[in-house]
Image: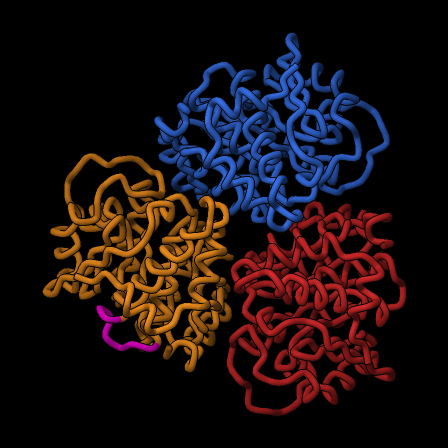
Chain colours: A orange, B blue, C red
Amino acid sequence: MALRALRPVVHSITNPVAISLAAGVLQAVGARPVMAQAPEELEEIVRGAAAVTINIGMPTAERAETMRLAAGLAHRHGRPWVLDPVGVGGSAYRRALAHTLIAERPAVIRANADEILVLAEIDRPLGGIGIDAETSADSALPAARALARRTGAVVAVTGTVDHLTDGVQFCAIANGHPMMTRVSGLGCALSCLVGAALAVETDPLAATVLALSLLGIAGEVAAETAPGPGSLPAAIVDALYALDRPTLERKAQLR
Amino acid sequence: MALRALRPVVHSITNPVAISLAAGVLQAVGARPVMAQAPEELEEIVRGAAAVTINIGMPTAERAETMRLAAGLAHRHGRPWVLDPVGVGGSAYRRALAHTLIAERPAVIRANADEILVLAEIDRPLGGIGIDAETSADSALPAARALARRTGAVVAVTGTVDHLTDGVQFCAIANGHPMMTRVSGLGCALSCLVGAALAVETDPLAATVLALSLLGIAGEVAAETAPGPGSLPAAIVDALYALDRPTLERKAQLR
Amino acid sequence: MALRALRPVVHSITNPVAISLAAGVLQAVGARPVMAQAPEELEEIVRGAAAVTINIGMPTAERAETMRLAAGLAHRHGRPWVLDPVGVGGSAYRRALAHTLIAERPAVIRANADEILVLAEIDRPLGGIGIDAETSADSALPAARALARRTGAVVAVTGTVDHLTDGVQFCAIANGHPMMTRVSGLGCALSCLVGAALAVETDPLAATVLALSLLGIAGEVAAETAPGPGSLPAAIVDALYALDRPTLERKAQLR
């Protein structure tokens, strides 16, 4: 696949829970992860990257400043970037951070249904601060469309079935395996994979479909042998590494 | 088990070595891990959690401040919390931090024998700053009892055999496998699991027995197939995910 | 092996991507990892350690200050220390940091060819900021020799074949497996393993040969069963744990 030939550098700012898995997922598909976060080196790093991904999980004042700088640099230098608003419903601090970042025009926002509902400011009782969605992805579709129209980003709501929209077109992907919801940091790694896809596919909707299909199918393959959520992440990285175009096309469940 | 039905949110402040494994262990038993550490969001996070766990490993000035705030918030809002005083013998800085945290009344202190001896301020030559105990758990029993009486916490001294006390009652658990001592961050993950147990079991001694039994038995099951300490953590998470009440009751080695 | 008998404490400052794997690798060979990074405790930690390793990946202002302090303390207290200049070509910030650290006289510098070329200030077009070398290790040999002579350190350039020099003697190691280049943090873990070897072997060249052979052979053994780069790191840790002196001597490909 193009990723393996081009080996794009993907600059990812992500949380400590997910960082190792995210780097592994990026390397498995041929991308070259760079996880830099010092303001002093951000301009060089962002300019040297083909895409940027920003995950607001476990924010600190220092990392939030890095996120704001990186989003601004990506916007200014024309690097497509992905926002992953992890746990945005959990605190006012994360909501404010996410809204500041959205002003720098992410190409893609990848989140679960609860997070999309919060970002779209749809009024509803929040379901808690856990990192996994309580809400099915399709119930967040109107919010996703509103968010996509307001921000210009492709919005991907991932869940049992993933739903994507650029505000006009819609697409659903039914790949994946239920055990994937028990793997910490897998959603964060998926957002990094969207960044890798953006580096080789200029249409953000097509890039997001590619990344979500890749991880979903890798999850299905991995779940055939992994006995539980502990061994699943390594098996997913193995499956991504082995995945070829024919398998991708045969197994993709696009609607 | 109750954890799988209730899916409690457990807020864990832990060190970067252990954070991914800790999140995996929590998710495997059905808990929802939140690893937030920004002072700006701590009050919302702690109030939204059923229990809090604080691990002093790899402290920084910033994370130490977060620990103090989180312990205070947990105490004030009535959330049971677990202290894991990793490497407390290694520096005066960690000793001071641990003592400040203890003033906020943890429900449980989980540590190895060396760490308990340091916390209890029993005068002895310190065995070094490594993260694994040189001292057997039962030799720290008098220190554990003194510490439990002084602090009001259940004190769990883990080792080949785990020893627990609330200052009056005593209990020993003989589950586990020697290879577990070679897995970085497993003790830290165990402290997070105690937090999950506190969320569903109000008696701290019973909760600690539950968590230590769960991890010990999962370690035994995992060691049947894992060829070494590299593959053991994933196998432990798999085993925790599959563990049911009958297996727990059949394999538990309580005294 | 001596590591298993002596169980040396190795103080490692490394990046968040690699930290868990680095700790696992150290524990697998019998070393006791300590990952402390607070300036307040560094003197006690460095003095209690047999060796120190410093990895400049993902620097922050805070961690860079810790690195400078730790390198100075290691130098002053006579603890051998290893420099891993991850991504030093990626930013002026990392180059300045690496040069400051080198002034504290590392015993060993372990890096890929691109990083060695940058450190040696050989004028060439830089190949990008990715974390894996684009350049073969032997093409960096003149730079490695110059760097070794200037700094007094053993310089190890790792790649398909690893090349080592103290500025006078040369040595090559042909162990390892291509899939190892796709494992995030494995080079960083290797630098920590060099630290462990320095704790039991006073000659830095011999210690580096030992560490590189250990990891290369463990990688070969692991690749026999691991189906991809996701399961490879755990298999490497398993193989390190099981590796004995006869296997090491039989499989070592030294030149």
Q: Position of residue C49 (x, y in %)?
A: 80, 50
Total count of labels: 0
Residue displayed at 36% across by 55% down: A220
Residue A58 appears anywhere in the view = no
The segment highlighted magenta reads A200-206
Residue displayed at 48% across by 68% down: A27
**Residue furthest toward the top?**
B168
Q: Please say if A168 is above or below B156.
A: below
Q: Nearer the viewer, residue B34 or A5?
A: A5
Q: Is residue C129 left or right of residue A96?
A: right
Q: Nearer the viewer, residue A206 or B188?
A: A206
Position of the N terminus of chain B by quadrant: top left
Residue displayed at 80% across by 62% down: C247
Residue C204 appears anywhere in the view = yes
Q: Is residue C175 left or right of residue C88?
A: right
Q: Position of residue B109 (x, y in %)?
A: 61, 25
Magenta stretch holds residue C141: no
Q: Position of residue C79 (x, y in %)?
A: 83, 58
Q: Is residue A146 left or right of residue B141?
A: left
**Residue furthest toward the right?**
C202
Q: Position of residue B127 (x, y in %)?
A: 82, 36
Q: Is residue A158 left or right of residue C113?
A: left
Q: Quadrant of residue B83?
A: top right
Q: Please say if A128 is above or below B107.
A: below
Q: Nearer the viewer, residue A248 or B69?
A: A248
Position of the C terminus of chain B by quadrant: top right
Q: Please say if B58 is above or below B206.
A: below
